[in-house]
Amino acid sequence: MIELDSTAWADVKASPGGNGVLTAQLLADLRDGDESAWGELYQQVCHQNSVGEVAFVAAPHMVAIARVSTPRIRALLLSTVGSIVASAKCYPADAAKPRDEWRAEFDRACAEAIVLASESLRDAPIDRDDSLMLIQAVAALHGHANLALLLQNGPDFCCPECGEPINYGRAVE
C-alpha cells in the first residue's frame, strides 16, 4: 500500500483530473475522523461514475480506515469502494485500469470490504441511510453493479454540478 505521506501519490491520476495528492490528504483526514472529507474523496475516486486510477490505490486505505472508524465513516467508505467496483463494471470505457502492482491489493480490499459491510449490517448500530449504503456496497462487491448504482443514486439521479441525467449502463460481464 502506498503510504499516505508518500510522494508516489503525485504519479497517480485522479478521476476529475489532477493527481492523487489530494486523495491521500482526504484519506488521512477521514482516518482522523473528519467525516467532511468524504464528499471530495468520492469525487477524486469516482467522479460521475467515472473511476479514476487513484481509486485502485485508495480502496485498500478506505477499507483499512473503515475497519477502525465510526459506523458512519465505515458506511461512507465501504459504499465508495462499492461505487468504484459498480462504476468500473457498468462504465468500463470511462474507467481507468489498475496497474498490475495494485491489482492484488485492490482485490484483497474488495474481499475484505464484503465481509466488513456484511458484519456492519449485522452487528453495528446504524441508521437507515448507513444501512442502505452498506447494502449498496454488498450488492456491488457481489457483482450486482446496476443494482448497486440504483441503490446509491435512485432512478432519477442527475449530476449535482451540471444537472445532466446519469444513465445506468449495462454491466459488462
Image (cartoon, helix red, strand yellow):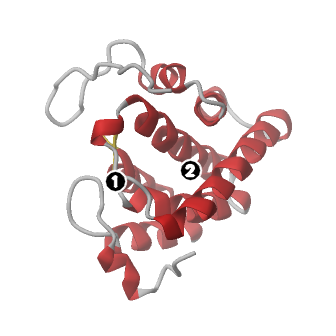
Three-letter code, disc 2: Leu
The image position of residue 55, as x and y in percent, is: 43, 56
Judged left or right of residue 167, residue 38 is right
Q: Where does residue 97 sit, x and y in percent of width and height?
A: 39, 53
Pick the residue in front: 11 or 64. Answer: 11
The one of 8 and 102 positioned closer to us in this rendering = 102
Q: Which residue is mark 2?
A: 77
Q: Which mark is residue 52?
A: 1
- Helix, strand or loop at label 2? It is helix
Residue 34 in view of the camera: no
As displayed, is residue 117 above or below residue 165?
A: below
Q: Quick check: 134 left or right of 41?
A: right
Snapshot quadrant of residue 8 = bottom left
Residue 170 against residue 54 in the figure, above or below = above
Identify which residue is drawn at 55% across, 40% down: 82
Pick out the residue farthest to the top.
155
